[in-house]
Image: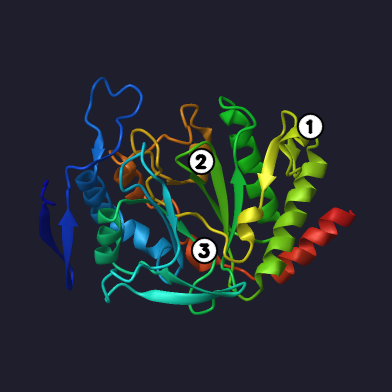
Amino acid sequence: MKRDRTSGLRVGAHTVTLHRQDKELLPAGPGANGGPDLTKGDLVAYYREIAPHMLPHLRDRPLMLERLPDGLDGERIMQKNVPAYFPDWIHRFEVAKEGGTVLHALCDDTATLVYLADQAAVTLHRWQSRAPHVDRPDRLVFDLDPPGEDDFEAVRSAARLVHGLLDEVGLASGVMTTGSRGLHVVAVLRGRQTFDEVRDFAKDAADTLAAAHPDDLTTAQRKEDRGERLYLDVQRNGYAQTAVVPYTVRARPGGPVATPLAWSQLDDPDLTARSWTVDNALDQARTDPWAGLARRGRAIGPAARKLAGLRES
């Protein structure tokens, strides 16, 4: 019988037991020229190092964990409920769902982040609200994926349009690569309105942009109705919906990372959704591209009124 190799790692006030750090989770990316695969130990090391930059985006937010215990070719577990075996020191928060409740993990410190990595939680997905006020979102997300695999220019253009409209109605926003195919534009809010109010605003904003750029943008949910237009996806703004956390690793070869950008970085002709990986995301994080953004949250009400005025003019 193969023995499970374990070791203890002291992280802050806690000792995290690590298991099988040589376990391969993600294959090397394109162009690796035979380079090493990403192991669980690599994932733990990355999350421990990126923690100071990632934790502000995680604290108090219910999480969904995307776990790959047997690597990319094995079962993919989308886990919401906290298992009974999680340590007591990991914070939890119970939220209501239809017919019951869900007990979500919260990631409020580096030890928790390291523990989740050891559980092969490759990708962390967060709510747009914080405990205990989980019914009041303080983030709004536009998810922009290219209409075709190689059409990142369409995503870049759409992100600029979303940014311009949000700025016009008084909402500050940041842009980030998803580490997958496209970009997220994330607006910061004060957390005073309900999910329904925020989602209605997001839908109205998307409709406004699609009406102004009908050849390039659409809000049609059915793929067959979109043609070659980019879909302005605002579905992540509903209650219990999630979006990938800034600086999280994506379950793809090479370990691409969802990475915040400065708006000026959209002008880089070499930019792609997977420009950063576990090997270089820390360098980008150290530039603090979203510096001060979280403190610029505004209420949706005034923005919604300004948007209504634009739609009527």
Tag in front: 1 or 3: 3
- Distance of mark 1 from mark 3, alpha carbons? 32 Å
The answer to which of marks 2 and 3 sits earlier in the sequence is 3
**How many numbered tags mark residues here?**
3
Q: Write down the residue under mark 2.
A: 264
Q: Residues within 10 Å of mark 1 (few under 14, many from 20)?
A: few
Going by the numbered disc 2, the residue's amino acid type is: Ser
Q: 300 or 102, which is in the foreground?
A: 102
Q: Which residue is mark 1?
A: 215
Q: Nearer the viewer, mark 2 or mark 3?
A: 3
Drawn side of residue 101 relative to residue 211, left or right: left
* Residue at (47% x, 46% y) in the render: 262
Q: Position of residue 33 (x, y in %)?
A: 26, 20
Quarter of the image where one finds residue 179: top left
Q: Residues within 10 Å of mark 2 (few under 14, many from 20)?
A: few
Under tag 2, what secondary structure? Answer: helix
Q: Is residue 228 above or below residue 19?
A: above
Q: Is residue 47 above or below residue 190?
A: above
Q: CA distance from mark 2 to mark 3?
A: 27 Å
**At 36% from the left edge and 33% from the top edge, which residue is drawn?**
253
> Is 257 drawn above or below residue 200 in the view shown?
above
| Image depth: mark 1 or mark 2 in front | 1
Q: Position of residue 74 (x, y in %)?
A: 36, 41
Residue named by callout 3: 127
Q: Amino acid at mark 3?
A: Trp
* Residue drawn where x is 75% and y is 64% of the image: 304
Q: Which comes sooner in the sequence, label 1 or label 2? A: 1
Q: Helix, strand or loop at disc 1?
A: loop
